Amino acid sequence: MDFKQIVKDLLLTEAKELEKASSHVSFDIEKAIELIINSKGKLIVTGVGKSGLVGTKIAATLASTGTSSFFLHPTEAMHGDLGMISKEDIVLGISYSGESEELVQILPHLKRFNIPLIAMARNENSTLAKYADVFININVDKEGCPLNVAPMSSTTLTMAMGDALAVCLMKKRDFKREDFASFHPGGSLGKQLFIKVDDLLRREELPIVSRETKLKDAILKMSEGRIGSVIVTDKDNKVVGLLSDGDLRRALMKDDFTMDCTVESLASSNPKTLKNKDLLASDALQVIEDYKIQLLIVTDNENRLIGVLHIHDLIEAGIK
């Protein structure tokens, strides 16, 4: 049995159904978007079975892209949770047949409170479609199921239509990356857009030495600091150099090397520094990568030391 061919056939079947749907977007998308945008309430998604599972995902997508939304099971609605729907809300009802008993039962109650209804179903003459203010056709000719029974192409199309609504609403609201990140502060994008250098800065117990410090004492301080370097400062706490373990290894290779020299004589006199501690940590990582360094020294405008940012701190914080 050629399973690779089975997978290929399934993907092509579902892709063809999506392509077919894209060629005849006949529903009033503008009206659907205006209803949602002008609503003072939430967009409540409801459905049962596979439609309910897809509806849960659609509600989550909407909620994360700027449209206040949640999923409500129609059975729970009939047993007390109907009160979760206010007169300012809009309902997105999903049923491929348009006749799901649990969903159909709540439709009269929605109309009784004049709650707008957007429907997704395959048949415009179905009960769900007849109650709807906007009808979105999700009919497919062929399911991915070899028996043409289990919902596959139809659920894929339904989810895609939900994504289409979300994208239209994002465009209408001019929803940006920063807005998305505000709904995902713990995600990778949220970290990129919210965590600043100041949030990750090491300020305490830094390996700092004066410019007159002997090399052997600087090495001891380097070992204690555990960042692979010592920072050389003057009497005003201004950064005048950085001695890295790489600088030390290169010095060891010289014939005139001595442990009695001052740290300043071997330190890099122009280390890369950053004067903006409010810079995004993701941008600081770019600086570190561009200069091929591991440690970024952060100073004020007078070059006085504030703290250091190590590449390991960025990695541990999940900054990419």
Image (cartoon, rainbow, N blue to C red):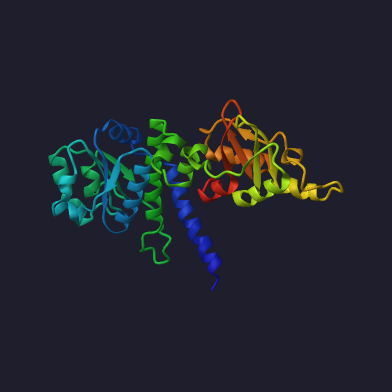
User: x%, y% of residue 107?
Assistant: 18, 47
- Dividing the picture into quadrants, the one containing residue 110 is top left
- In terms of depth relative to the viewer, which is nearer, 256 or 176? 256
Horizontal side, residue 114 vs residue 9: left or right: left
- Among all residues in the image, which is located at the extreme bottom? 1
- In terms of depth relative to the viewer, which is nearer, 117 or 13? 117
User: x%, y% of residue 187?
Assistant: 45, 47
Horizontal side, residue 272 vs residue 187: left or right: right
Horizontal side, residue 80 vs residue 259: left or right: left
- Among all residues in the image, which is located at the extreme top? 302
Determine the residue positioned at 21% across, 43% down.
Answer: 131
Determine the residue positioned at 53% across, 45% down.
Answer: 319
The answer to whether residue 215 is visible is yes
User: x%, y% of residue 285?
Assistant: 59, 41
Determine the residue positioned at 56% across, 29% down.
Answer: 300
- In terms of depth relative to the viewer, which is nearer, 165 or 141? 165
Q: What count of labels does the image hold?
A: 0
User: x%, y% of residue 314?
Assistant: 55, 46
Rendered view: 111 above or below 106: above
Q: Quadrant of the N terminus?
A: bottom right
- Among all residues in the image, which is located at the extreme right? 255
- In terms of depth relative to the viewer, which is nearer, 40 or 133? 40
Horizontal side, residue 315 vs residue 53: left or right: right
The answer to whether residue 138 is visible is no
